[in-house]
Image (cartoon, rainbow, N blue to C red):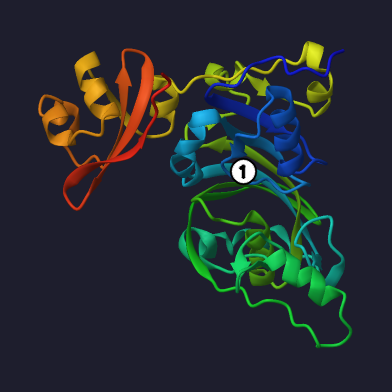
């Protein structure tokens, strides 16, 4: 075994199948060590008790974070009815109990939580309240006696639940499938479903199965090529199956964006920040309602452009030279 990084850092993406018991920060820490760089970031946190797909960007690919962070996601979760914890997950302390509903009572409230809904995020979350993380404020409040330090007030915000389905019922547990917009808290969803059914509940298990077009366990080779399954892989550098997948056309398509190619002369104009109008004149792909697109020079990704106020502008430009 060696402590030397086995790869030199460039730019790329890692699809990490995070296991429960480690935080997203833990995963990043060891990936940074393996790659020998601090230029690594994920595009959406998974709680310590949760597992599943964590998309990690490294090097110059970090500039694409915003386009990955706002993608819709799919989950399989398990609700335990009858008990609610302060964190809405298995790591919290019990704060309320109520009778477990029957299957019909639980399932009939699902329609209340599909489409656009207003959701109150968990108090134990990374959302900032008055410049500080809500979770930090909540932990401080839990250490105080009486009401001398109140829990932060979490403002409701609009999220979209595209699909909510009851997969199995084994009281007090219910397994659910959720397809939702970015910013949705499945812990909050579990709490609210239980409350609407006249009970209490928390999310005891969670697996993120898909982000945009990237999914686990369905033969998606763009994921399988460099999907790491356990933290132990990172501790055995000589056997570490870690590689950076470059941003390619398949990844851009799965991200839900369109792409087009430019010539070397046009690419140089992009690198020089020239106005996009002349470059886009002969690109019929963009003569639509499209508002975001990627630019490639042959197979090399070089830029994201966005349409704002009717004009195309640079989102980010990556020049590896």
Picture coordinates of residue 52 (x, y %)? 68, 36
Residue pictured at 16% horizontal, 28% vertical: 279
Q: In this view, does 81 lie above or below 34?
A: below
Residue pictured at 73% horizontal, 24% vertical: 34
Picture coordinates of residue 26 (x, y %)? 77, 39
Which residue is labeled 1 in the image? 75
In what quadrant of the picture does the N terminus appear? top right
Is residue 97 visible in the rendered structure shown here? no
Residue pictured at 81% horizontal, 57% vertical: 172
Picture quadrant where residue 9 is located: top right
306 to the left or right of 133: left
Residue pictured at 32% horizontal, 21% vertical: 296
Is residue 151 visible in the rendered structure shown here? yes
**Residue reaching furthest to the bottom:** 147
Q: Is residue 274 above or below residue 143?
A: above
Compare residues 67 and 97 and report the one nearer the observer: 67
Picture coordinates of residue 180 (x, y %)? 51, 50
88 to the left or right of 160: right
Picture quadrant where residue 197 is located: bottom right
In what quadrant of the picture does the C terminus appear? top left
Within 10 angstroms of label 1, few (less than 14), some, or many (20 or more) residues? Answer: many
Tally the numbered discs: 1
Compare residues 220 and 27 and report the one nearer the observer: 27
Asked which secondary structure carries label 1, the reply is: strand
239 to the left or right of 52: right
């Amino acid at each position: 075994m060696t402590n030397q990084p086995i790869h030199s850092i460039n730019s790329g993406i890692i699809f990490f199948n995070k296991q429960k018991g480690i935080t997203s920060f833990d995963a990043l820490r060891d990936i940074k060590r393996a790659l020998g760089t601090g230029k690594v970031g994920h595009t959406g946190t998974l709680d310590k008790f949760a597992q599943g797909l964590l998309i990690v960007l490294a090097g110059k690919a970090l500039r694409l974070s915003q386009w990955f962070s706002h993608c819709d996601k799919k989950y399989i979760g398990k609700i335990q009815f009858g008990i609610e914890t302060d964190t809405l997950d298995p790591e919290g302390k019990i704060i309320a109990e109520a009778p477990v509903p029957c299957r019909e009572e639980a399932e009939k409230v699902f329609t209340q939580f599909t489409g656009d809904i207003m959701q109150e995020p968990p108090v134990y979350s990374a959302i900032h309240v008055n410049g500080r993380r809500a979770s930090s404020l909540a932990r401080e409040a839990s250490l105080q006696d009486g009401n001398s330090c109140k829990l932060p007030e979490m403002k409701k915000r609009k999220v979209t639940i595209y699909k909510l389905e009851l997969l199995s019922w084994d009281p007090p547990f219910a397994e659910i499938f959720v397809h939702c917009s970015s910013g949705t808290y499945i812990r909050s969803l579990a709490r609210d479903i239980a409350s609407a059914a006249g009970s209490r509940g928390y999310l005891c298990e969670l697996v993120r199965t898909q982000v945009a077009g990237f999914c686990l366990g369905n033969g998606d080779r763009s994921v399988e090529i460099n999907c790491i399954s356990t933290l132990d892989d990172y501790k055995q550098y000589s056997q570490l199956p870690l590689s950076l997948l470059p941003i390619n056309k398949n990844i851009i398509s799965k991200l839900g964006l369109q792409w087009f190619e430019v010539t070397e002369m046009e690419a140089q104009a992009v690198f020089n920040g020239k106005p996009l109008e002349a470059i886009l004149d002969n690109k019929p792909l963009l003569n639509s309602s499209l508002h975001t697109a990627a630019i490639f020079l042959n197979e090399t990704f070089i830029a994201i452009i966005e349409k704002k106020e009717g004009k195309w502008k640079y989102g980010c430009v990556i020049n590896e030279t």
